[in-house]
């Protein structure tokens, strides 16, 4: 049921796309977070276990924690926010001759095209370094450019909500750092800081996150917490939890929950994936559990697994996902 729903949202017709936004700008933008299918399905709780391409936006220290060469294409759509997102990412921890892991990601998004018409481009490049067998460090450099229409609101030009006629709202470089430790076999903790140059805008908020996760060959569990130091008048928190079950070494079933203290919104999520030794297709759907202003986000991710050394078989272990 989830795959047809996501495909329907991604292929929504022009008439529905032209309707007005029916959620708040804060919920629609969602702090500019990149909606990977696995991340969305697990409620955002991947600071400890989020290897492969999600590590570029969640915790770059996770890149060396699994030996992979993964290429991902993603598309996301929210009907209430009239938001669409498209991106490409690659993470390599196998083919380079050093112990460094690295990755690149580029994402373009748009929301509310008939209103504020906000668009943003998010480019990231990251490196991760293992320190022995159980600890790794990582960092990601991010370039963010956000543009928005001028005088598009119901009251015309408004300095509190307008875009800027001569340039973007945001055009900045910033960076993330993270650390991950494997305490016991299968048990990991991860911490990460985002936008640490303190851009001073809710479009790129400075945040700190930590998570603890446990995985086996057949399932994984994780719980995370996050603090937002920028968006609101005081520091607000977010709690996230997710679980996934692996069936027949090919199928992933995921579920998650998220509570955002800034918007006072609970959200539930669900996802499915088919993981072949060479490729994978995954979907994730999240729904805000509040009245008429809640929004739905659907994500479709396609991944290709390449490993010239034969060191990894992605379908054999959740650690490579």
Image: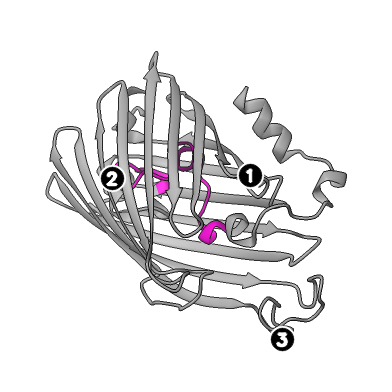
Question: Mark 2 and mark 3: span between their CA atoms?
Answer: 42 Å
Classify mark 2: helix, strand or loop: loop
Residue 120: x and y in percent read: 62, 65
Q: Residue 291's mark?
A: 1
Q: Nearer the viewer, residue 107 or 200?
A: 200
Residue at 71% x, 38% y is 9
Give the vertical position of 311 relative to 168 (above or below): above
Cβ–Cβ under 8 Å for marks 2 and 3: no
Residue 287: % across, % down: 57, 39
Check the image and name the residue furthest to the bottom. Answer: 166
Relative side of 266 to 130, left or right: right
Q: Which residue is mark 3?
A: 166
Q: Earlier in the sequence, mark 3 or mark 1?
A: 3
What distance separates the C-alpha of mark 3 from that of mark 1?
38 Å
Other-residue count near label 2 (Cα within 10 Å), few / some / many at <14 / 14–19 / ≥20: many
Measuring 69% from the left and 82% from the top, which residue is drawn there? 164
| Residue where numbered disc 2 is placed | 48
Measuring from the top left, give residue 5's x and y in whole percent.
67, 30
Could you tell me which residue is drawn at 74 percent across and 65 percent down? 117
Which residues are the magenta region?
30-54
- In this view, the residue in front, 231 or 148, is 231
Q: Split into 4 quadrants, where in the image is the N terminus?
A: top right
Q: Is residue 270 left or right of residue 177?
A: right
Q: Earlier in the sequence, mark 1 or mark 2?
A: 2
**Element marked by disc 3:** loop
40 in the magenta segment: yes
Number of residues whose C-alpha sits closer than 10 Å to that of mark 3, classed few (under 14), some (14–19) or many (20 or more):
few
The part of the image, by quadrant, that contains residue 257 is: top left
Tell me where residue 24 sits by quadrant.
Answer: bottom right
Residue at left offset 62%, top offset 77% = 169
| Quadrant the C terminus occupies | top left
């Amino acid at each position: 049921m989830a795959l047809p729903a996501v495909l329907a949202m991604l292929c929504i017709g022009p008439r529905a796309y032209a309707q007005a936004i029916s959620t708040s700008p804060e919920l629609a933008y969602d702090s500019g977070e990149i909606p990977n299918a696995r991340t969305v399905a697990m409620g955002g709780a991947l600071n400890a276990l989020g290897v492969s391409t999600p590590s570029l936006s969640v915790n770059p220290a996770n890149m060396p924690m699994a030996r992979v060469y993964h290429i991902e294409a993603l598309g996301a759509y929210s009907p209430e926010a009239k938001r669409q997102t498209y991106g490409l990412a690659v993470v390599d921890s196998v083919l380079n001759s050093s112990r460094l892991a690295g990755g690149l990601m580029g994402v373009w998004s748009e929301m509310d095209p008939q209103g504020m018409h906000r668009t943003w481009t998010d480019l990231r490049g990251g490196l991760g370094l293992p320190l022995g067998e159980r600890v790794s460090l990582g960092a990601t450099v991010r370039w963010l450019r956000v543009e928005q229409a001028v005088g598009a609101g119901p009251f015309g030009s408004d300095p509190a909500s307008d875009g800027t006629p001569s340039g973007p709202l945001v055009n900045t470089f910033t960076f993330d750092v993270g650390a991950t430790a494997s305490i016991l076999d299968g048990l990991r903790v991860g911490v990460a800081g985002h936008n640490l140059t303190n851009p001073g805008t809710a479009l790129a908020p400075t945040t700190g996150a930590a998570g603890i996760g446990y995985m086996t060959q057949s399932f994984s569990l994780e719980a995370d917490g996050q603090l937002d130091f920028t968006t609101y008048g005081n520091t607000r928190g977010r709690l996230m939890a997710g679980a996934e079950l692996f069936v027949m070494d090919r199928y992933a079933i995921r579920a998650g929950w998220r509570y955002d203290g800034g918007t006072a919104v609970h959200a539930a999520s669900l996802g499915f994936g088919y993981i072949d030794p060479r490729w994978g297709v995954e979907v994730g759907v999240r729904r805000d559990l509040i009245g008429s202003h809640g929004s739905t986000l659907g994500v479709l991710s396609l991944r290709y697994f390449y490993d010239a050394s034969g060191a990894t078989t992605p379908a054999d272990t959740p650690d490579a996902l």
